Image (cartoon, coloured by chain):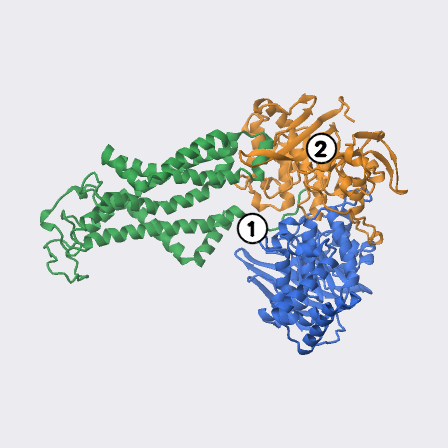
Amino acid sequence: MTLKKEEGPILNISDLRVTFHTYAGDVKALNGVDLTVRKGEVLGLVGESGCGKSVTSLAVAGLLPRNAEFVGGTITLAGADILKMSREQIRLRRLTDLAMVFQDPMTYLNPVLTIGSQILEIITQEPQLFTSTLVRHRLEEIQSEGKEGPALAAERERLLSMSRTGKAGRREVNRLARHYVISILRKVRLPNPAKVLDMYPFELSGGMRQRVMIAMALVRRPKLLLADEITTALDVTVQAQILQLLRELRNEIDASIILITHDLAVVAEVCDRVAVMYAGNIVELADVDELYSNPLHPYSKGLLASIPRVDEVRTQQVSIGGSVPNLLFPPSGCRFHPRCPMAFGKCSQVKPPLVEVKPGHLVACLLYEE
Amino acid sequence: MVSETTNLLETKDLLKWFPQRGGFLNRAQSYLKAVDGVTLGVRKGETLGLVGESGCGKTTLGRTIMRLTEPSGGSVKFEGNEISKLRRGALKPFRRKMQMVFQDPYASLDPRQSVRSALVEPMRIHKITRSRKESNDFAEELIDKVGLNQDHLSRFPHEFSGGQRQRIAVAIALAARPSFLVLDEPTSSLDVSVQAQVLTLLQDLKQNLGLTYLFISHNLAVIRQMCDRTAVMYLGRVVEYAPTRLLFDNPKHPYTVALLSSVPIPDPRKRGQLAVLSGDVPNAIDIPSGCRFRTRCEFATDRCSSVSPPLVEVEKDHWVECLYDIDFSKRSKMELVA
Amino acid sequence: MAEKEPDRSSQTGRWADTRYMLHLFRQNPIVLAGTLISAASVIIALISGLLVSSTYWNHITPSASLCWNNQLIDWHISNVYNCGGPVYPLGTDLYGRGLLQMIIVAIPVDLQIAFEVVASAMIIGIVLGGVAAYMGGAVDEIILRVTDIFLAVPGILLAIVLLVVLGRTIPILTTAVLITWWPFYVRLARSQVLSEKEKLYVERLRATGAGGARILFRHIIPNTIYPLLIQGTLDIGAVILTVSALMFIGLTPDPKYPELGNLAKQGIQYIFTAPWLILFPGLTLLIISVGFNLLGDGIRDVFDPRLRR
């Protein structure tokens, strides 16, 4: 792997359009999505069901079903254009640059295999991608252990020769992988990591399973982590644990995170910037403080005003009328206009572009066009 | 707490234990104590909130009150009448007055039944209307009350969105002209924008029709919004019970405090204040001795494992099940129960 | 406050289902073939009275016995009689009756027996299986055990015994086959109802105050009927084959009786000298049962996703 100095954003999505071909017709799921993710940031992608947030992340990961068609736009991940790659190339990318964590860990873990075999499989299926990482990690471990006995010294020699030649025997790789995986499990704050390796998914609680999923994502040292509704299925006390873990991890790992959720409170807790999606478009994008104190798009405003809060009671019940549109027949122009209290004539004719209204604050709304 | 004159619904030491069978003769080897002694009362005209995490027994409690599952012990009284042991025939008039709305709007409607037919059915069962015309008129009135159109009556469930289905479910519940409604996580499966609509609808209906609600939810923010009084459940028992404002401003049980401080707030200026409760919920088969929360409680003492705390009134109308009166800011405690 | 309705016209109304069905047929020509074959056989059965007189099978014309007047196919068999007189497109049988006409008269007979057996088995299955599953406990046990007993006895043998003992008439034949067939439907209906009754809408109905009978017959059974219908359609072919097999081995009320298996029976002796006797009835049996089989598969594909909706 070449060491290229990446200066630009880690992910750049430009005017992405995706349509699903179904028996009932064409579902125009993504209608020109523009999004960038900077290095090391946590970006929240917020929206209700059907807005396209999951579709966007699946598109980036190359995991869209066969009836999906890329109608337009580009996705650039770590400098490489995803849409021009073959499936095999994308798969390798998923192994090295990109990792995804999903909502329900019970369905994403194989119930008949131990945790250890599932995590180790990630490494052992393409060992050459990980050899240098494993060796380096073990060397660091040996160094931090302090005084060295003869066994450790011999191991150190073996490791150094391995890193020189770049070759390692399979048994050696498995052993190193085990050390590495245990350290990752420790990083996600799982108690007793060595024991967890030999446990089955049903023996773990929901929170622990989700930590395992996060560990599986971190094993590859990805540049980008896609977390799709990872706390939605968890109890609130367990969710608090995972959110705290995310906040601690982001200081320790080198990755950018896209946190996909419908929960505006979760976003406020962990994210640096927030993108609000509606019916296949990004309608607002801003720093998290800015968005919550000064939302510009009518949808964002409605959403923030209507969510119940645990720290105060709203005297006035505010809600957004109507419901999410059927994307087989999406509204013309701005897709939010049928529900928008501020809509005017032009809104049904022109799709508003995402423009920077203040530094760092972008909105897609005709109200803010000069 | 349980004032006989104004309670519409009352439970006393209500139990629901699920036997875990196994072994040679399929005997009950142990019990999953989903509801393990719940005493509470819902006053006429109020909304009582029931909050807790998964496994606390709140849904089972709702179902037991509705006699959808048989109580293992204890009593349930509706309008002063004991209903926990009534047989089907005697139970029927109570079924009319007590209705339920379920969490999953996609599964709670018969997919082959039109909306009109589903609305008319409770009327037929309880003989609320006397003719077809009366039934149809009432159905039209109900569909309008929940904010849907007349032409929705001839449609089928799969043609509606989640929020609309939930409105239909509410309309069906109202068709029996009940006085009491158990709402089991009615908005948890819905989108945020639709959730607000449905909650508003529920509040309007309650006022216009003079209903009483038992509102079950895991979402503390929604509970705060909707409920007059709230009961917090943990592992099958009510651990704290107070008017909502008091509960949120001055919680006295460590679990309540942990729960409240685990909920993230949609305001980035208040981030980083989440308190993390360690450990996982123990299962309801192996309940810890004494106080069941002691395994996760930072204020637990030796007494907590041997003495089971009773429900104590710490201030007017505010009940806690704890041996100590804890000051959470000073992190000190005083004995509450000798 | 009325909501603004999004346009769902392609998902609503009866035309949505038809469109979906057509879409599936477009994707699967084999199913289409099955549907056409089944439809054709039913139509032939219905109009058979118009095509051939219903007493045709009772006339014997000795002079026309075992003739093959059709010039189109040469059997390369010596002594294939070419009787003078009318052309018999599929030859004649032992009694001098035209085989084509006999087949047309036989199809409705077979289909009628098959429909009767399948329909009765379905009704018995729904009632017994549904009640067993919904009520559980002792009722369930009793019904299950009785069903098991019948399942344990090999079907055809039981039918043969019944026919030999009680007489070889068509009603007895129908009843005998029904007796061996109903247990499968009880099992099927029971398992369907068992899983359906756990669904949330059933609990909601109980909360509303609905009684068991209402829930079972007005709600659960209409929702679980599709697997039974599918099984029934698949079984029509199987029943026809069973009935034909019974007639084939001689359990027939009359050697001249117009039934496909009975016709084929004549052909065993003449398989080398008059091969059309066994070939064409056999082919008809094959096509009809395959047709219904494919139709059953097709119904499964069309209706199952709708249940998932």
Which tint is chain C? Answer: green
Amino acid marked by disc 2: Tyr
Q: Is residue B1 left or right of residue A107?
A: right
Q: Which picture quadrant has residue A289?
A: bottom right
- Residue C276 at x, y percent in the picture: 19, 55
- Name the quadrant of the N terminus of chain A: bottom right
Foreground disc of the pair 2, 1: 2
Amino acid marked by disc 1: Ser
Find numbered disc 2 in the image and state the secondary structure of the residue it sits on: strand
What crowding class fits label 2: few (fewer than 14 Cα within 10 Å), some (14-19), or many (20 or more)? Answer: many
Which tint is chain A? Answer: blue
Q: Which mark is residue C9?
A: 1
Res. A350 visible in picture: no
- The numbered mark 1 sits on a residue in which chain? C
- The numbered mark 2 sits on a residue in which chain? B
Res. C217 visible in picture: yes
Asked whether B170 or C193 is in front, the reply is C193
Q: Which picture quadrant has residue B120?
A: top right
Q: Which chain is orange?
A: B
Asked whether C75 or C140 is in front, the reply is C140
- Residue C203 at x, y percent in the picture: 58, 35
- Residue C258 at x, y percent in the picture: 22, 44
Query: How far is mark 2 from mark 1, CA to CA?
Result: 37 Å
Q: Is residue A38 left or right of residue B110?
A: right
Residue under circle 2? B213
In the rendered image, the vertical position of residue C158 relative to residue C24, given as above or below = above
